[in-house]
Every structure is written in structure tokens, then in C-alpha cells.
Image (cartoon, rainbow, N blue to C red):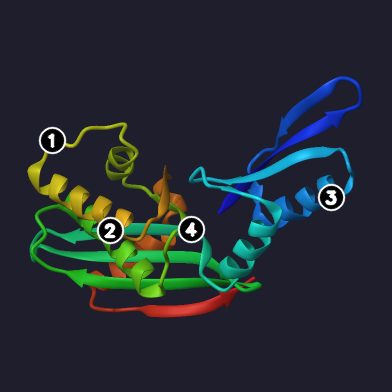
């Protein structure tokens, strides 16, 4: 989750001036906020998260202590592969996140049957990532989803329409799950060569090689 600071600076004899920071990490935001308050020139200081919720410094400290023990700073890559002969899909997902002072990576894939085409495989892959996040206990967190399936990501951003009834049903399921987990989601289309991990996992699932691993990363 990113935060920004808004503080009112007292100018002797000339009233107040309001300043707003860029979006920054929580620990840095708290550190800057405490420094600003110690200056004695701050009339008011408020922290805002990406969902628009506001916090005072005391509340911010408590929030970060709670968040630190939960999976946060989530980055998800997903991809779907398709075998038109068997009508099966291989779903691949890679999740990077922080917990405590450590960073982790989850790699997982799955075989999924009765899929009509490659486009549907991508929607199923996106839904799979949300199931993984739910299993991790993710709730009320910011999460960036990256994939090379531009259509689904632009539709989730609300910038492209979806005309296919079957895919619309997947979109409904995906949006319902996002709302259930109270995820503040962002969607970023990327080139296929930047999605190699998830693509490989999807291909491995189609070959019957199922992977579910978690490791600490630097």
C-alpha cells in the first residue's frame, strides 16, 4: 500500500500553506510525518492511503504494525495457456509480497478443464490468482496485477467493453472476488517477454507438471 501526506504549514503572520507529497511507502511516510510534526511548524498532518482513507500519526503507527504481519505490497503475474484438442487450460500465477521484514515469492499453477479458447484461459488464470490471494488471507490490501492478456486487464480497468457472454461471466466472478477480498486492485498490461514466469507455469500445467512453491527472495 502506498500513502501520501498532506500537511498544513504555519507561516508566521501569513496564515497557512498546504503541501501534499507523492505516493510513498508507509514506513517512509510515517518517518517524514514524524519529522514534520517535530519541526513545530505543522498545524495539521493527515496520511491518505490509495483507497482514500485518512489517518493521523498515532493511527498510522498502529496501522503499519498490523499490516507488517500480513502479506502486503502484492505484485501478481498471471497467464493462461490452452490446448484446443483437449479443451484444457494451464493456469500460471506468480505472487511477490512482503511479510514482516522479508519478501516472498509464490509460484503456482493448475490444470482447468472445459475451456472454450485461449481468451477464456486468461480469465480463468486471473481468477486463480484471486483464489490464491484468498488462501493467503489477503484482505484490504493494494495489489497490482500484471499480464500479457491486454483485453481482460483493460476490461477490468473499465476502459474496454466485453461483448462475449461467457467472458462476461468470468469478469463478474473476478470482480465479485475482488470486492469480497476488499482488494484495491490496479491492472498493468505487459509484453509477453516480461511475463515469462507465469507463462512457463501455465505451459507446465498443460504438460501435467503441477507446481506450488513458496520461497523467500532478496
Nearer-N-terminus badge (3/1): 3
The Cα atoms of the two marked residues, 3 and 1, are separated by 52 Å
User: Residue 13's mark?
Assistant: none
The Cα atoms of the two marked residues, 1 and 4, are separated by 29 Å
Q: Which of 97 and 209 is in front in this view?
A: 97
Above/below status of 148 relative to 162: below
Local secondary structure at mark 1? loop
Nearer-N-terminus badge (1/2): 1
> What residue is disc 1 on?
163
> What residue is disc 3 on?
35
Local secondary structure at mark 2? helix
Residue 102 lies, in percent from the top left, at 63, 73
Front label number (3 vs 4): 3
Nearer-N-terminus badge (4/2): 4
> What residue is disc 2 on?
177
Which corner quadrant holds the C terminus?
bottom right
Q: Which of 37 and 194 is in front in this view?
A: 37
Neighbours of disc 2 within 10 Å: few (<14), some (14-19), many (20+): some
Amino acid at each position: 500500500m502506498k500513502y501520501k501526506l498532506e500537511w498544513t504549514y504555519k507561516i508566521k503572520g501569513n496564515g497557512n500553506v498546504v503541501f501534499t507529497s507523492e505516493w510513498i511507502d508507509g514506513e517512509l511516510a510515517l518517518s517524514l510525518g514524524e519529522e514534520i510534526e517535530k519541526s513545530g511548524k505543522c498545524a495539521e498532518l493527515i496520511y491518505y492511503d490509495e483507497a482514500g482513507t485518512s489517518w493521523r500519526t498515532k493511527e498510522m503507527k498502529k496501522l503499519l504494525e498490523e499490516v507488517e504481519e500480513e502479506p502486503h505490497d502484492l505484485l501478481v503475474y498471471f497467464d493462461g495457456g490452452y490446448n484446443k484438442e483437449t479443451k484444457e487450460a494451464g493456469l500460471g500465477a506468480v505472487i511477490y509480497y512482503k511479510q514482516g521484514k522479508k519478501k516472498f515469492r509464490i509460484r503456482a499453477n493448475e490444470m482447468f478443464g472445459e475451456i472454450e479458447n485461449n481468451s477464456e484461459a486468461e480469465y480463468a488464470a486471473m481468477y486463480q490468482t484471486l483464489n490464491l490471494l484468498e488462501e493467503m488471507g489477503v484482505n484490504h490490501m493494494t495489489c497490482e496485477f500484471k499480464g500479457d492478456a491486454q483485453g481482460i486487464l483493460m476490461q477490468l480497468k473499465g476502459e474496454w467493453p466485453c461483448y462475449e457472454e461467457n467472458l462476461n461471466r468470468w469478469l463478474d466472478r473476478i470482480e465479485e472476488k475482488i470486492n469480497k477480498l476488499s482488494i484495491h486492485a490496479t491492472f498493468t498490461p505487459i509484453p509477453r517477454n516480461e511475463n515469462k514466469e507465469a507463462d512457463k507455469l501455465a505451459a507446465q500445467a498443460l504438460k501435467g507438471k503441477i507446481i506450488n512453491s513458496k520461497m523467500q527472495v532478496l
